[in-house]
Image (cartoon, rainbow, N blue to C red):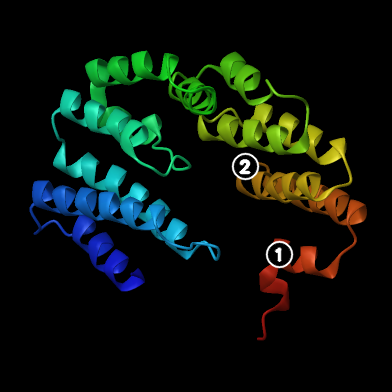
């Protein structure tokens, strides 16, 4: 399967390939993969990984193929409504330029009446699409001030270039608890500092490593320090 993903990935990027044909093949592969996982043992998560990669490729191939916005919107909705497997979500942000104003309006209207879990996910992603800081914070922290939600909010804020706000929520998530979710948020805080506040990276890393003095965490944060020269 991974070999097939590699071939499709290459085809999506290959300018000599017909974008519409590649898009059609990727879409069919995604639909087949979802059907397979509905009737298979995926306890190791390998099939789910394939589906997630195909979802990413589908959005990427749509950018090149530029299918009809309304047609894509209906397929987007049908993907969520028709499949036996309900734990995969398409990201309206990834399809936004292809869906255009009309396609996005159709997806928004559907999302407003979707089941509660899917509706909450779509609200979060549309907040990102709208670059609405208040909506991002509201939707991501709607279920409580837990480290996992602080991290999700921080990532969404970084996604729209609101790095100062992302810093604040990554910091709050790191400081919220001593558990593994706060530790994950701490790792993201270090990455955020590395990417956007390089002068403070060491400071943040020290805070995180002091809170969780684990050599494995240091390896995860700075793998290059442990590579053989």
* Quadrant assignment for the N terminus: bottom left
The secondary structure type at the circle numbered 1 is helix
* Quadrant assignment for the C terminus: bottom right
Q: Is 63 positioned to the left or the right of 129 in the image?
A: left
Q: Position of residue 87 (x, y in %)?
A: 48, 42
Whether residue 99 is visible to the viewer of this picture, yes or no, is yes
Which tag, 1 or 2, sits closer to the chain's start? 2
Q: Residue furthest front?
A: 39
Q: Quadrant of residue 107?
A: top left
Tell me which residue sits at (78%, 65%) in the image: 218
Q: Residue furthest bottom?
A: 229
Identify residue for label 1. 220
Residue 31 sits above or below residue 222 on the image? above
Tell me which residue sits at (73%, 44%) in the image: 185
Q: Quadrant of residue 83?
A: top left
Residue 144 sits above or below residue 206 on the image? above
Tell me which residue sits at (26%, 54%) in the image: 32
Labels in figure, total: 2
Q: Nearer the viewer, residue 75 or 192?
A: 75
* Label 2: few (<14), some (14–19) or many (≥20) C-alpha neighbours in 10 Å: some
The secondary structure type at the circle numbered 2 is helix
Residue 223 sits above or below residue 136 on the image? below
Identify residue for label 2. 196
Q: Position of residue 142 (x, y in %)?
A: 68, 20
Which label sits in the foreground, 1 or 2? 1
Tell me the distance, in whole angstroms, between the alpha carbons under discs 1 and 2: 19 Å
Q: Position of residue 108 (x, y in %)?
A: 37, 17
């Amino acid at each position: 399967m991974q070999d097939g993903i590699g071939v499709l990935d290459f085809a999506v990027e290959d300018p000599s390939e017909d974008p519409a044909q590649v898009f059609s093949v990727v879409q069919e592969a995604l639909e087949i993969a979802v059907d397979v996982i509905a009737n298979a043992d995926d306890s190791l998560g390998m099939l789910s990984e394939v589906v997630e990669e195909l979802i990413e490729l589908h959005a990427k191939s749509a950018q090149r193929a530029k299918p009809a916005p309304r047609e894509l919107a209906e397929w987007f909705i049908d993907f969520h409504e028709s499949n036996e497997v309900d734990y995969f979500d398409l990201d309206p942000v990834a399809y936004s330029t292809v869906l255009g104003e009309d396609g996005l309006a159709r997806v928004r209207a559907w999302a407003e009446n979707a089941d509660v879990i899917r509706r909450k996910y779509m609200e979060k992603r549309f907040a990102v699409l709208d670059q609405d800081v208040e909506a991002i914070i509201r939707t991501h922290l709607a279920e409580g001030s837990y480290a996992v939600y602080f991290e999700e909010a921080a990532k969404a804020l970084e996604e729209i270039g609101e790095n100062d706000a992302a810093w604040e929520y990554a910091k709050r998530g790191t400081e919220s608890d001593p558990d593994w979710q706060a530790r994950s948020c701490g790792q993201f805080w270090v990455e955020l500092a590395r990417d956007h506040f390089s002068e403070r990276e060491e400071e943040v890393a020290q805070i995180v490593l002091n809170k969780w003095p684990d050599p494995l965490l240091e390896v995860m944060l700075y793998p290059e320090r442990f590579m053989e020269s």
